[in-house]
Image (cartoon, coloured by chain):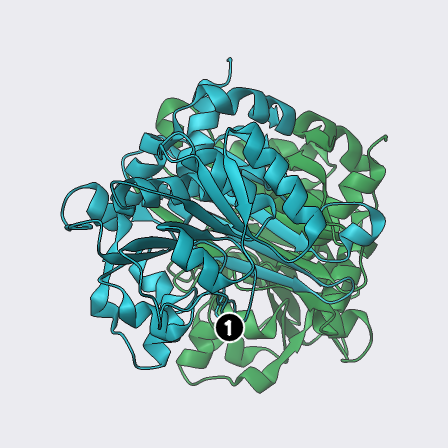
Chain colours: A green, B cyan
Amino acid sequence: MSKIITLDEIKQILPSIDLIPIIEQGFVAYSEQRCVVPPVGELSFENPPADVHIKYGYIKDDDFYIIKVASGFYDNPKSGLPSSNGLMLLFSSKTGELIATLLDEGYLTDVRTGVAGAIAAKHLAPQIVNSIGIVGTGTQAHMQLRYLAPVIDCRKLQILGRTNDTIDSFREYAEMLGFEVSVANSGDEVLNTCNLVVTTTPSTKPLLDLENYTGNGIHITAVGSDTPVKQELTERSLLRADLLVADSRSQCESRGEIHHAIEAGLISPNDIFELGHLINGNSVGRKNDQQISICDLTGVAVQDIQIAKAVYDATPK
Amino acid sequence: MSKIITLDEIKQILPSIDLIPIIEQGFVAYSEQRCVVPPVGELSFENPPADVHIKYGYIKDDDFYIIKVASGFYDNPKSGLPSSNGLMLLFSSKTGELIATLLDEGYLTDVRTGVAGAIAAKHLAPQIVNSIGIVGTGTQAHMQLRYLAPVIDCRKLQILGRTNDTIDSFREYAEMLGFEVSVANSGDEVLNTCNLVVTTTPSTKPLLDLENYTGNGIHITAVGSDTPVKQELTERSLLRADLLVADSRSQCESRGEIHHAIEAGLISPNDIFELGHLINGNSVGRKNDQQISICDLTGVAVQDIQIAKAVYDATPK
């Protein structure tokens, strides 16, 4: 009988796992084309409105293949349920047997996205970070901060949010992690104050614009936009970057920040480096703290593969 | 916590469920375009060789959506494991929550395919069946006979198989079900002896040819071919049919028996009726026992949806 791992168990196990090298290995495998990751399956619902995404794949010569189901049922909050849900299935890639069901309710997707942000910062942030800026105050803002904390020494944080309630609760969380928190009034203020910025919102209108940026070097990780319509940075911001990085070059041509700038004719896909190639040393990253770098994360299934395996491996058998 | 339903539990529950009307309703929903069934997801493996298919969808206004994982790991028998495996996940289409995991190991796919054969026979077989012919002796041969038995009065069976061992064990099973069994030496013998024939093999070379058929009316259900390459009937057999039926017209244009005949330029997609339209009365079926009818079943996800729901509904809560 296969193993069932509940969300509570997952939350207990995760702190004991060093996720950064595990997800890094995933990005490297992806960029070295050692992953088999077919196109995402999509199922849409009208009544109530909902979307289900099915991501699946494996790393060649690995022992497992993974299927992840992630759903958004947008009316759920009306009845007190979270809109996100989902699970991950871990199968043997040698026999096809189901090994484990991770009933993570979408939590591992949030975590692996947070870890990806930390990896982007590890490889792309200026050596000396004077202040971290986070745009957005939701689940992913919390995740980003949680996984940034161990890789970035800086404990100054600036938040840009829309409502006082969510700003307050995110501030509380950040203070609990040991951050000294200020609240920004605008995207420009964040860009002028911080040299490591993470955007985490589902906005469809740009919130940050590097056009008039006069600072002394910055890295921005854009996490929020993972569809063709979401956008957190102006297209011209990407033109200002000395270094443009994506988790998946092919995927960023159709979704996320980069594709908006490509469609506007401002940049070419050839301008983009892949995170996995920075990690394995095939591409050169930031050259000095004065550069402007942008990393566009749209999420790739190899992150799910890696985190599912890691949780399973760490679960008592 | 969602429900886990094991294969043993599924096998205990199934005999209490009248599957025919349930799968019939599925075919009708499919033909009336009340199903949302995106393209099948496919994952291939080289070492060891394997294929995984992910089918998913729902019937509009239904309470559930279903994801089915079905795998074939072709080296498994070398280590004493069945090559097929799989499971079905039943989610709420109102909230996205996982309701049940059916650990059926591929069994429900075998069953729903058997039931589809019985439905085809119910709607297309001559009124008086003088002998049933089954081509093939494997799992699906057993399933077809098991689900035919309650809908067809005839208890004469002719088997066409390749090896004595499998013929003997299928004969034993059929006798247990009350059939009087004979063994055929050729496809022609089956066609000349039986007026209800079911083909259940993974053959890629035609086993039956109606070209020189001189009998007095027959129905053939072709179950085995569900890919672009498998084929159990010669293309010209389809030209002899007075009535051509498929579970899915669109799917039969690219896989199964019909697409071979379409590609050979012998028939047109417009010659095909859908099983769901025969069931709901929108299309007229067989007019008399003297006609030749062929039903090509390639398998549609709505069958999985219906059987998963039925098993869940019948499971003690």
Q: Position of residue A291 (x, y in %)?
A: 68, 76
B175 lies left or right of A90: left
Residue A71 visible within the image: no
Q: Which residue does the image show at 59% across and 42% down from the upper left? A: B106
Give the quarter of the image for residue B303: top left
State the residue in front, B44 or B166: B166
Up-down: is B101 above or below B187?
Answer: above
**What amino acid is found at the position of numbered circle 1 in the picture?**
Ile
Give the quarter of the image for residue A69: top right
**Residue placed under numbered mark 1 in the picture:** A258
Which residue is farthest top? Answer: B316
Q: Which residue does the image show at 49% across and 69% down from the upper left? A: B206
Q: Position of residue A84 (x, y in %)?
A: 49, 38
Q: Which residue does the image show at 45% across and 56% down from the upper left? A: B190
Q: Position of residue A184 (x, y in %)?
A: 51, 49
Q: Position of residue B149 (x, y in %)?
A: 43, 33
Check the picture and name the quadrant holding the N terminus of chain B. top right
State the residue in front, A198 or B312: B312
Q: Which residue does the image show at 32% across and 63% down from the upper left? A: B250
